[in-house]
Image (cartoon, rainbow, N blue to C red):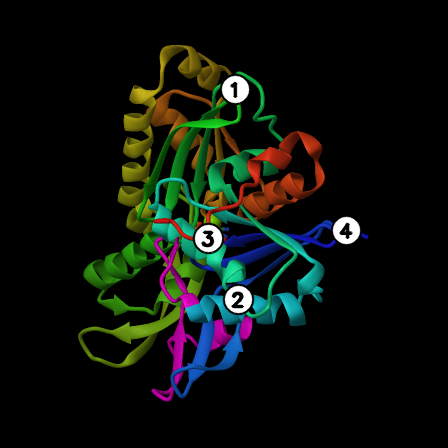
Amino acid sequence: MTNGFGIDLGTENLKIYSTSDGVVTNVKNTIAVVDKDKLYACGDEAYAMYEKAPESIAVSFPIVNGVISEFDNMQSMLIRVLEDQVNAKIKSADVVIAVPTDITEVEKKAFYDIFAKSKTKTRSVKLCEKPLADAMGMGLNINEPTGIMVVDMGADTTEISVISLGGLVLSELLPYGGNKLDESIVTYLKRNYNLLIGQKTAKALKEQIGSAYDGKTDSMVVVGRDVVSGLPVERTIDGTMVYEGIREDLNSICQSIKIILERVPPELAKDIVYSGIYFTGGSAKIEGLSDFFTEVTNIKVNVQKNGDETVAKGLGRVLTESDFKRFGYAMKTRIFS
Ligand SMILES: Nc1ncnc2c1ncn2[C@@H]1O[C@H](COP(=O)(O)OP(=O)(O)OP(=O)(O)O)[C@@H](O)[C@H]1O
Ligand SMILES: [Mg+2]
């Protein structure tokens, strides 16, 4: 039986594809540490402690803006999740890790070193460019001479890329995604309704009644603090209020896509117009997103269902399909040697 793992270290979620059963395990990419370096909890358990933990427990997200910001935490958490939740036999495993394209070599090397410089070594470790994994995970054949535009809207990042013949023609990593939408909901409700809510509540509002169009009437009851009286209050929030909060952010992502489209060589632009832009990542689940973007760009938009899993699934294809194997590459152990 094969023992391969495709690993997508997201800012919010850690996704692991296992070749033995084709299943993607998705847990919060969160770690709780006590006494500076003792792992106390990780994954969903640690996320439940976020914004609630006492000072003695440090809860953090080891990936920030798509890159590793806490190397040791990321390493110990990943090994723990592989052993405990994925039942991986790490020593005989082949792993492929996704990396954003628009980052430095040093930042990429940190992803490689998670296993290359670990006491718990895997049989092999490879990297794969995230936009390529996204496209493969959406079932596209990236080896063909056809222009493909992929937009991955994650939690802390939005990666916009154009692919042709298995290579990246353009790629830009914007430092905002779903988390920015949550922050904007918090700001909007505070400014317009004197209501202060937590980030997790804002996220729930966005995921449950958020939309990329005006007039959604669904509502949700939340508890926050009244800014004037300072006391906790219960309020009903409706879809229109959430939309008003996130409208500007959706617009700016749209404008960034337009700017990239203007830089695409004409022959590839033609392909993109025919096939449409491929949207993926967890934030692409927001209702009505395709119509919103089509209205501004005039181009068809295909939104991937379960977009948060496409990178991990694409890495699975690198591990199992000979046509895509070449997209996994090793790195030099020393960059400056
Ligand atoms: N139904 C939904 N509507 C809107 N947003 C959603 C929905 N479901 C999930 N999200 C958002 O998707 C984001 C997480 O997606 P994903 O797992 O792709 O991010 P990530 O890979 O961890 O982040 P990044 O790629 O930026 O490093 C979160 O911001 C979450 O709120
Ligand atoms: Mg992601």
What amino acid type is highlighted by mark number 2?
Ser
Q: Circle 3 is placed at which residue position?
A: 333
Residue occupying image coordinates x 77% and y 51%? 2
User: Height in image: 215 above or below 118?
Assistant: above
Q: Circle 1 is placed at which residue position?
A: 275
Q: Earlier in the sequence, mark 4 or mark 3?
A: 4
SS of the residue under disc 2: loop
As drawn, is 103 to the left or to the right of 44? left
What amino acid type is highlighted by mark number 1?
Ser
Q: Circle 4 is placed at which residue position?
A: 2
Q: Nearer the viewer, mark 3 or mark 2?
A: 3
SS of the residue under disc 1: helix
Q: Nearer the viewer, mark 1 or mark 3?
A: 3
Q: Nearer the viewer, mark 2 or mark 4?
A: 2
Q: Circle 2 is placed at which residue position?
A: 118
Q: CA distance from mark 1 to mark 2?
A: 43 Å
